[in-house]
Image: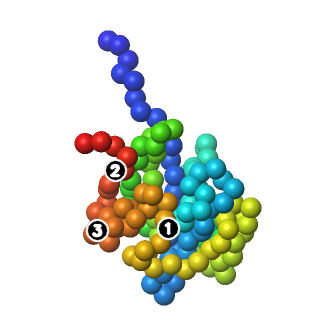
Amino acid sequence: MPAIPRQQAYLAVYVLLWRDGRILALQRQNTGYMDGLWCPPAGGVDLGESVAQCAVRECAEEVGVSIDPDSLTLLHTMHRLTPERYVIDLFFQADFTGQPLNAEPHKAAAIEWVDPSGDWPWMTYIPQAFQHMQNGSAFSQFGFTQ
């Protein structure tokens, strides 16, 4: 029997850090991917790294805070198609300690506490993820045709 080609997806983690009903967001710059737009602390899972390890690392690298990996709560999973690849996006929330700061000014122009339901220049798929989270939907797709 011939082998069936299987999809290989890039795994990305987003961490929603909450304060007073707002989430921490970064404005991307100098990355070559959706620069000028905003997203929560996020990044790709490195080879050999767990999703929790990625979340801890990205929060420390991008906004200088420590998160408790035991506090990670999965809020939403998105299967996304881009011109370059397939992506599985995992959106978590977590408890954190420390004062957030722009720890990578060469990759982020600014950080802000933002109302996720407000009109904000998010990366293209982020508003859909937020809408699904608000509706209690655990899964969505983005970029695929029906």
Q: Quadrant of residue 101?
A: bottom right
Mark closer to the chain start, 2 or 1 = 1
Q: Quadrant of the C terminus?
A: top left
Reading the image, the residue beneath label 3 is 136
* Name of the residue lying farthest toward the right: 106
Q: Residues within 10 Å of mark 2 (few under 14, many from 20)?
A: some
Answer left or right for 10 relative to 29: left
Q: Residues within 10 Å of mark 3 (few under 14, many from 20)?
A: few
Circle 3 — which element? Answer: loop
Seen at 43% across and 74% down, the residue is 119
Mark closer to the chain start, 3 or 2 = 3
- Between circles 2 and 1, the one closer to the viewer is 1
Q: Amino acid at mark 1?
A: Pro
* Above/below status of 92 relative to 31: below
Reading the image, the residue beneath label 1 is 121
Residue 145 x/y as whole percent = 30, 42
Is residue 99 among the parts visible in the rendering?
Answer: yes
Indicate which disc residue 141 carries: 2
- Between circles 1 and 3, the one closer to the viewer is 1
Circle 1 — which element? Answer: loop
Is residue 64 among the parts visible in the rendering?
Answer: no
Indicate which disc residue 15 carries: none
